[in-house]
Amino acid sequence: MKIIICIFMILSMTLCVSCKTAPTDLHTTSREESTMSYLNDAEKFQAEVTEKIDDILSRSGDQPVDQLISTVYSEDWLFTNIDIFRRYNPIFSYQQYLEEVDAAAPVECIRKTGEGAAYVVYQTEQGRAYLFFKQEYGRWVLCNGAYVQKHLSLSDFDKIQVSDSVDAVAAVDPAVNAWKEVAVHSDTEQCQSVHLTSDGLVVVEYRMDGDRLLVSGITTSADYKWTDSQWTEDGVTYDYRILSQDSIG
């Protein structure tokens, strides 16, 4: 018993000495220091983003699109790596930004169409993809996109009727085949395909009938703008205007 007591006393004294000789220069980060560190990181991030955006925007020019673009993508690769058919939704927290798109597929042709508005052009083996951005809080947000394979006019869609299948639309505009692969696997009951023509925009609305897409309505717009009212009371207006020199045909 005396031996156990002695061992206990020795251990206690050792712990006391350790506590007294432990380093005393441990630093506790204050709230102010944490805030300053966060602000510094945020400023550094914004500076890096601004530098990337300035570099991307500097690639704009007046040359024809064929002279600016040297990379031709397959549809599968481009649509897998970039959300071409995405539309900006203000109630969603996730957004896709210009510098992220550039990281996936380097921008070779970008056109500024106004204050805080621009679009990017990508070439595929079958057509051209157009991604439209708007400036928001120091970033360029992907708002909407369109894919074109052939020269079309508004009158080409006159034969499309409500309750036609998406295949009837594809007979007019084969570019819709790439879009429908995304739409069929979406979890929405209603969706729209967008078609750029030489004299306006065509938006074809669909409803799901089992695993089939059937036309439920058609909207045309001479100014290439379309307002989607399904998410917000005022709706979101998407601008699909491109320069004539960047169109197909």
Image (cartoon, rainbow, N blue to C red):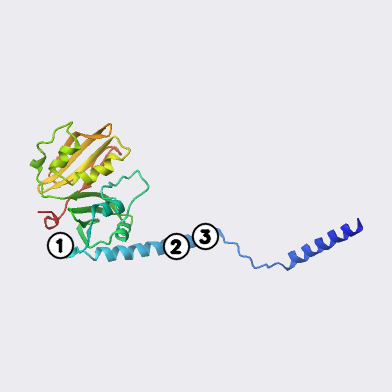
Question: Are there few (<14), some (14-19), or many (20+) residues within 10 Å of tag 3?
Answer: few
Residue, x 27% and y 63% (percent of image)?
A: 56
Q: Residue 41 carries which label?
A: 2
Residue, x 21% and y 53% (percent of image)?
A: 130
Outermost residue toward the left in this view: 155
The three-letter code of the residue at mark 1 reads: Asp
> Disc 3 vs disc 1: Cβ atoms closer than 8 Å?
no
Secondary structure of the residue carrying tag 3 is: helix
- The residue identified by callout 3 is 34
Q: Which one is closest to the eye, mark 2 or mark 1?
A: 1
> Disc 2 vs disc 1: Cβ atoms closer than 8 Å?
no
Closer to us: 9 or 249: 249
Q: Position of residue 161 (x, y in %)?
A: 14, 33
Q: Which of the 4 image quarters holds residue 125?
A: bottom left
Real-space Cα separation, disc 2 to disc 3, in angstroms: 11 Å
- The residue identified by callout 1 is 66
Q: Is residue 9 visible?
A: yes
Q: Is residue 134 visible?
A: no
Q: Which mark is residue 155?
A: none
Q: Where is residue 98 in the image (x, y as percent from the top left)?
A: 30, 57
